[in-house]
Image (spheres, rainbow, N blue to C red):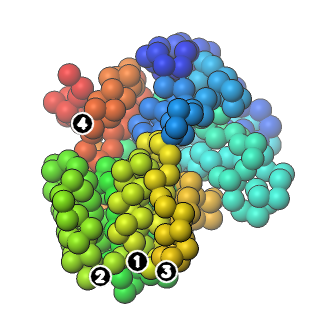
Amino acid sequence: MHCQCVHEFGRPLRSDDRPDLAPQGTEVVLSVTAAGVCHTDLHIRDGGYDLGRGRKLEFAKRGISLPLVMGHETAGKVVATGPDAGNIDTRKTYVVYPWIGCGTCAVCKGGNEQLCGTPKFLGIHVDGGYATQIRVPHPKYLFEIGNMPPETAAPLACSGLTAFGALKKVENTLKDHAPLIIGAGGLGLMCAQLLRAMGAQAPVFVDLDPVKREAALAAGACAAIDPSAPDVVAEIHAAAGGAPLAVIDFVGAETTAELGFNAVSKGGTYVVVGLFGGGAPWSLPLIALKSITIRGSYAGSPGEFAQLMELARKGEISPIPTTRYQLDEAEAVLNRLAEGKIIGRAVLTGVGDYLPEAADQRVR
């Protein structure tokens, strides 16, 4: 198998060639046909998260060992199974649920493996999909993609599920009140598609990039606002028909946290999803005076992923803009993502699966 690996935090990815994977027990091995590139991968390559005030969460101190094959948005076909994996249809293509927990703690047994205290997330704690093959511990983490192209299905494992998981936390507000979505990257655009599928009000978006604001409007936003405008909160309230009851922040920076806090209505909910980094800028008395809920949202549960995949297979989610690249372009794609030059989602294809018609969209 061929793969792209982090060998040293803060350094470029390196190509590795390894023996093909051999599954044991309930394990299955897939031949990777598509692997999404996510902002989380930037943090993994860099070695941690900025916690603000000079602090950093360092992966090297949190049990993430190297070398590591990144990639947690993976689609592929089963090519080998362990003796206890059961019968699996090898003719079908699957997307892999990557947020795998220990399976034995109360959190996992309660159906929220993505919140497990001793996780085994694919592409983060164990090897993932930036490779020609990926090992999955059990067939229950495989979800059929139906007629979707693999490059459309793969990002659903993070981009789609993370957006869906955040929306489920404010679902009761969406039918009658326009939400505010901060960030029109891959997650934000996926969120716009999901809102439409859920029968929700058209959202208001904010993003610094005018190209991404245009993409948000094309995806169904009722307004797309420049957050650097001096009266940005007033603009948001005017576009939403009042202060939004739900704000979802797909950036997670100090500036966006301040904006989301200021824009949300009294009694509303501000959901932090993005991991850009920094410290909270809020005044503590105002949290009580506004009676708002501030909560985090990390990926989504296996049950939520099943719901999401059902929507996707029915064609109720329109594909977001996606650009395909070869596996060996992973480092260049990550750099392009860091520079804010990716609209929608970037997806790597296997070495032998590169599509020539996408050559003009490759990284230069």
Residue at 42% x, 29% y is 350
Other-residue count near label 1 (Cα within 10 Å), few / some / many at <14 / 14–19 / ≥20:
many
Q: Which residue is mark 4?
A: 341
**Amino acid type at image mark 1:** Ser
| Residue 123 point in image, percent of width and height | 57, 34
Viewer-nearest of labels 3 and 4? 3
Position of residue 95 in the picture relative to residue 148 (left or right): right
Q: Earlier in the sequence, mark 4 or mark 1?
A: 1
Q: Which residue is mark 3?
A: 267
Viewer-nearest of labels 2 and 4? 2
Mark 3 touches mark 2? (CB < 8 Å)? no
Tell how many labels.
4
| Residue 264 point in image, percent of width and height | 39, 72
Q: Which residue is mark 1?
A: 265
**Amino acid type at image mark 2:** Gly
Residue at 37% x, 66% y is 262
Mark 1 touches mark 3? (CB < 8 Å)? yes
Q: Which residue is mark 2?
A: 242
Other-residue count near label 2 (Cα within 10 Å), few / some / many at <14 / 14–19 / ≥20:
some
Position of residue 246 in the picture relative to residue 192 (left or right): right
Residue at 47% x, 58% y is 282
**Amino acid type at image mark 3:** Gly
Position of residue 126 in the picture relative to residue 188 (left or right): right
Q: Secondary structure at mark 4?
A: loop
Q: Earlier in the sequence, mark 3 or mark 2?
A: 2
Q: Quadrant of the C terminus?
A: top left
